Amino acid sequence: MKPLHLLAAIVLTATAHAVPHHVVIVVGPNIPSALHASINGQLESVMASGEPGTQVTVFSGDTYQTLSSVTLTDSRPLLQRERNVPSIRAAVLAVRQGTNSAALLAVPRVLDEISRQIRPVNGSILLIGDAYPCHGQEGFCLSTNWPADGQLLQPASSFSTVERRHQLEQTTVHWLTTDPDRSSGEIHRRSMERFWSLFVSTQGGSLVSYTPNVTAAFQSAFSGRREPFQQVTVNPADTNRLFHWVGEPPVEPVPVIHRIDLFVTNEVTRIVTNWVEEVRRAPSPWPAVPPGKTGFGVLWTTPVGESRAVDIDLHLPVPKDGVELSWKNKMSPSGRYYRDIQKSDPNLSPDWKNSWEYVELEGLQLPEAIYLNRYAGSSAVTGEVRIEHNGRVQVIAFVMPSVSGNRGADANRRERTPQWLRVDLRAVLEKLEAR
């Protein structure tokens, strides 16, 4: 029992100031037998020294069922061990005996099921299992591929976070990886770390640890730490594909026009909100907006090496006139649609008419939202919507993931169609009216 006492002391030190919370331990299939004793010892140590009030749930990553759930009720180690450890040992034994050798740790489904069945409050999820499994039915193997950022944006992908974007809010994820040797090298390992971090963060959670060290993984899960071990954002240059192969160089982020705080990843509502910043000059020549009028422009670019033949159309409702201006309807009593750009090349022309799709309205007219439509082309797009009134300029940055243009179709269901993007202007209106 000496090793167990040593581990208990380690975990006791790590959790001495921890806040009671709910820890869900996911025991995946095919855990190497060499790790069984260590994992079992850590579970016993946690149960013997955890903060009173902490709830510990053991969940099967194979059958997607809760195997055991206990709440630590006493701070005296011996009493806690007596009351709690038998149920934990029984749960681990049940998972070990029922392990399906053909199964894999399907992390997307595991997190879905925990969110649906348990929804841990102030929770931590400790995944124990493979990080590089082969998904034979889906035709890829994470020991030779790694997912591109485009996986997150495709509703049909098992890695899609389109419908999961709030699923892990107030939840941390920690991962004891049981197959680190299956990584083919440093680039592969770092790419997988980044993707799993991104998969968790785009659901509102944080991947706090990702390690093959049993003690470190358990300490992290019970520590109460919430900061992700790396900061990640969607790379627009990596949204037009689904996989990378081992041996490829990593995809470097392309320069963007301005800092982007919010990427458009929700393919259901696709609303850009509350990213508003004053700027002093345009990234490409900007038309002179006459006093008393409001100018609206949209400019975009594609990743380096991708086709620039992408046509994004601006559709702008005119509040005074009750009509929508676009390339199909260029005039109204108080508005004019000046330019329809089929291929945007920022900074390449001294003439604004070659870069900006542009509309002008009389007075301070600002609709609640405007719409962008991918009319043609399929490359990912980074761009900005620019609004100017009385010399004051507001900018909203946007990203449109890779998808084929639909030539303006589905306008009556634009909120549910990936070729359409709704850009919320309420924050801009509040700022302009406050001047």
Image (cartoon, rainbow, N blue to C red):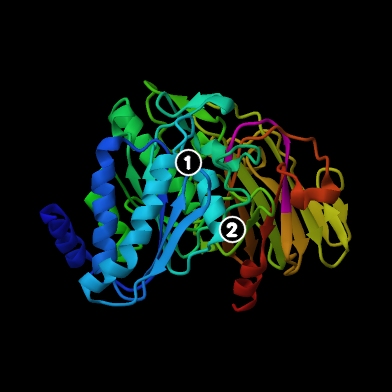
Q: Are dots 1 and 2 in contact, CB under 8 Å? A: no
Residue visible at 66% across and 35% down?
A: 403
Q: Is residue 342 left or right of residue 126?
A: right
- Give above or below for 125 relative to 32: below
Quarter the N terminus occupies: bottom left
Residue 92 position in % (x across, y down): 37, 50
- Measuring from the top left, give residue 166's x and y in whole percent: 56, 59
Front residue (pair 348, 38): 38
Quarter placement of the C terminus: bottom right
Three-letter residue code for mark 1: Asn
The magenta-colored residue range is: 371-381
- Residue lying furthest top: 247
Residue named by callout 1: 235
Badge 1 or badge 2: first in the primary sequence: 2
On whether residue 41 falls in the magenta region, the answer is: no
Expressed as whole percent of the image width and height from the top left, the position of residue 116 reads 59, 58
Specify few, some or many for label 1: CA neighbours under 10 Å numbering under 14, 14-19, or 20 or more: some
Can the viewer see residue 154?
A: yes
Alpha carbon of mark 1 to alpha carbon of mark 2: how far? 29 Å
Q: What x and y, as percent, mark residue 266?
A: 62, 51
User: Magenta stretch: dominant SS?
Assistant: strand
Label 2 sits on residue: 116
